[in-house]
């Protein structure tokens, strides 16, 4: 089964900083990757689908890139409302399940 | 408005069964995949499985195969997650979510674009 790892597991950054989160797959997953933001007590929110496509309504400071096994979520200029936990999810194979990464917790300094 | 509305919080005893519902509105229920995700207290997201209500084709994560049943009733636009022989370790929030679809590309997206509000399940003796 395809496993996902994320790094870092947590980070603390200042408003205006550029933040990068990495997601690595245990095998190639083409472009079958999404990114989500989850705030405490809330359901996850889709940010990026198909590796690099911005979901409607998501601010343009969020972007995604990568291919194969290595993927990146970038926040170009961190805002106070960007705190939360960020998850990647792969959609490589229905029978293996669409697994999530372990998450990256983002705090605002 | 496109939305998924889940049934309310549940408290169950070990060994009991439970069926959580997820009612869809604002879109054609039978043409989207509806997935289920578990989140244990203070933990990350676990993929449970997914169903296509149009023909009730369901696919399960190997970790949950045999432990849960996913079904759908297209006459009332509702998907279900049934949990059998509940244990304390089933205590979690369960979310339903819709897999996105591009009508221009005629392609299911790699992303779950609409989420239910979550159903908290507590299993305790």
Image (cartoon, coloured by chain):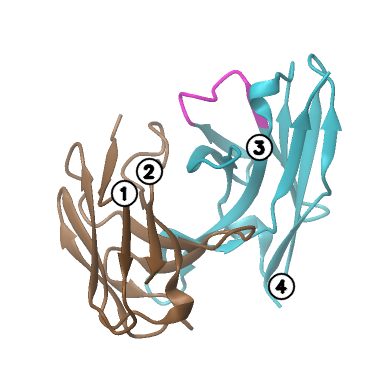
Chain colours: A brown, B cyan
Q: Is residue A88 left or right of residue B3?
A: left
* Residue A21 position within the rendered picture, expressed as x and y whole percent measured from the top left: 25, 60
* Pointer 1 residue: A9
Say whether marks 2 and 1 touch (CB < 8 Å): yes
Residue furthest to the front in view is A109
C-alpha distance separating marks 2 and 1: 8 Å
Instruction: Examine the rendering and report whether any part of residue B109 can be seen.
Output: no
For the point 34% across and 39% down, the residue is A93
- Residue extent of the magenta highlight: B61-69
C-alpha distance separating marks 1 and 3: 22 Å
Badge 3 marks a residue whose secondary structure is strand
How dense is the environment of label 1, judged by Cα within 10 Å: few (below 14), some, or many (20 and up)?
some
* Pointer 2 residue: A102
* Pointer 4 residue: B26
Q: Mark 4 or mark 1, which is nearer to you?
A: 1
A76 over B108 or under it: above or below: below
Q: Please tell me in which quadrant of the rendered image residue B102 appears.
A: bottom left
Subunit that carries the residue with mark 1: A
Instruction: Examine the rendering and report whether any part of residue B66 can be seen.
Output: yes
C-alpha distance separating marks 3 and 4: 28 Å
Instruction: Please check whether the numbered discs 4 and 1 fall on a single chain.
Output: no
C-alpha distance separating marks 4 and 1: 37 Å
Rendered-image quadrant of the N terminus of chain B: bottom right
For the point 20% across and 52% down, the residue is A30
Say whether marks 1 and 3 touch (CB < 8 Å): no
Principal secondary structure, stretch drawn in magenta: loop
- Of the pair B50 and B11, the residue shown nearer to us: B11
Instruction: Please check whether the numbered discs 4 and 2 fall on a single chain.
Output: no
């Amino acid at each position: 089964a395809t496993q996902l790892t994320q790094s870092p597991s947590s980070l603390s950054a200042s408003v205006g900083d550029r933040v990068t989160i990495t997601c690595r797959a245990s095998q190639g997953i083409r472009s079958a990757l999404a990114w989500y933001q989850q705030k405490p007590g809330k359901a996850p929110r889709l940010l990026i689908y198909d590796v690099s496509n911005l979901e409607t309504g998501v601010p343009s400071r969020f972007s995604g890139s990568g291919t194969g096994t290595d993927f990146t979520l970038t926040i170009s200029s961190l805002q106070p409302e960007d705190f939360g936990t960020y998850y990647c999810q792969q959609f490589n194979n229905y029978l293996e399940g669409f697994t999530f990464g372990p998450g990256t917790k983002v705090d605002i300094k | 408005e496109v939305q998924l509305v889940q049934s309310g919080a549940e408290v169950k005893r070990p060994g009991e069964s439970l069926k959580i519902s997820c009612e869809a509105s604002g879109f054609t229920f039978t043409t989207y995949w509806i997935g289920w995700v578990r989140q244990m207290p203070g933990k990350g997201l676990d993929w449970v499985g997914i169903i296509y209500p149009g023909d009730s084709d369901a696919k399960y994560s190997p970790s949950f195969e045999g432990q849960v049943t996913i079904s759908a009733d297209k006459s009332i636009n509702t998907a279900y997650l049934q949990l059998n022989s509940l244990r304390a370790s089933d205590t979690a929030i369960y979310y339903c979510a819709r897999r996105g679809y591009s009508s221009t590309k005629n392609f299911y997206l790699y992303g779950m674009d609409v989420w239910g509000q979550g159903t908290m399940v507590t299993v305790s003796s």
